Amino acid sequence: MNSLFSALEEANRRPAPFECYTAVDLWTDEHTSEKMLGYHLNADLDVSSRRTVFINRSVEWMTSTCKVGTDTRIADFGCGPGLYTNRLAKLGAQVTGIDVSKRSLDYARRIAAEQALTVDYVHGNYLEIELEDSFDLILMIMCDFCALSPPQRMAMLKTFHSLLAPGGCVLLDVYSLDAFANWKEEATYDVNQLDGFWSPDTYYGFLNRFKYEGEKVLLDKYTIFDPERTRIVYNWLQHFSPESLWAEFSQAGFADHQLYCDVAGTPFAPGTDEFALLATK
């Protein structure tokens, strides 16, 4: 009984902001990586990837705004199953995709081969990967930037800056302070939580959602009990104002930026749950 009580105490413990980083676990676990790929490939859901109609519009806008052509060198950090990279390669761009999920990259490579596309897919954690090429455009899409701690974000931005050719750009999207204001703390419990997302076998899942008002950080802390093990997965989401996001880019050495509502170039307007930034070296 004491061990059960201790486990529940830990499930409900509020950690310090970004105390633990488990994002890689979602993409390397055999079961959850398969589930995540399914979300990626569902053309009608904004889960893991945007809807297909949005991705097509986004690539069209990038092509025009960033003048993507046969000599354009593009790196997509967190490329997943190649939904952007393969489309951009089809336009003739020289594309590199980096992702920690082998399952997603296997799918991306298969589609690229079927379409006779040349894409350099690199398997690894983009926080640790070292690239030798330089790029005209770097992408980090689907608010991946928000899952990183302040030191991780600064290291990432300095890596982006070093990899960009003169005049090159970074395009990414983030969650806004308006979205943060709408979240509420909660604690929930379900058998086979999220429709079996965490395991193919029966399990018991606890979700504790914590808000950190000062840091503007949200945490979804999942504790999963199954017959073999107990796991805790931390899903951190930093939220930004346009000013706070640009402050981080400016500190990393970027020279200028433009704001949009999304990575498809919708003109910026306050009050949206997400926004995008196109920063120039």
Image: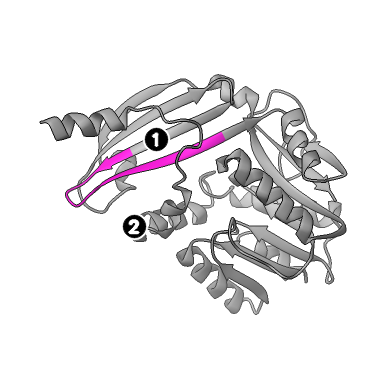
The residue positioned 74% from the left and 48% from the top of the image is 171
Q: List the residue tagged with mark 2.
A: 31
**What residue range appears in magenta?**
223-237
Q: Secondary structure at mark 2?
A: helix
The residue positioned 74% from the left and 24% from the top of the image is 270
Q: Tell me where residue 2 sits by quadrant.
A: top left
Residue 234 lies in the magenta-colored region: yes
Q: Is residue 139 left or right of residue 25?
A: right
- Which residue occupies the foreground of this view, 245 or 69? 245
Give percent across and percent down for residue 199: 28, 51
- Estimate how packed mark 2 is, as few (under 14), some (14 to 19) or many (20 or more) residues with alpha carbons within 10 Å: some
Q: Secondary structure at mark 1?
A: strand
Residue type at the position of mark 1: Lys
Residue type at the position of mark 2: His
* Mark toward the viewer: 1 or 2: 1
Q: List the residue tagged with mark 1.
A: 221
Give percent across and percent down for residue 132: 72, 70
Is the N terminus in the top left, top right, bottom left or bottom right quadrant? top left
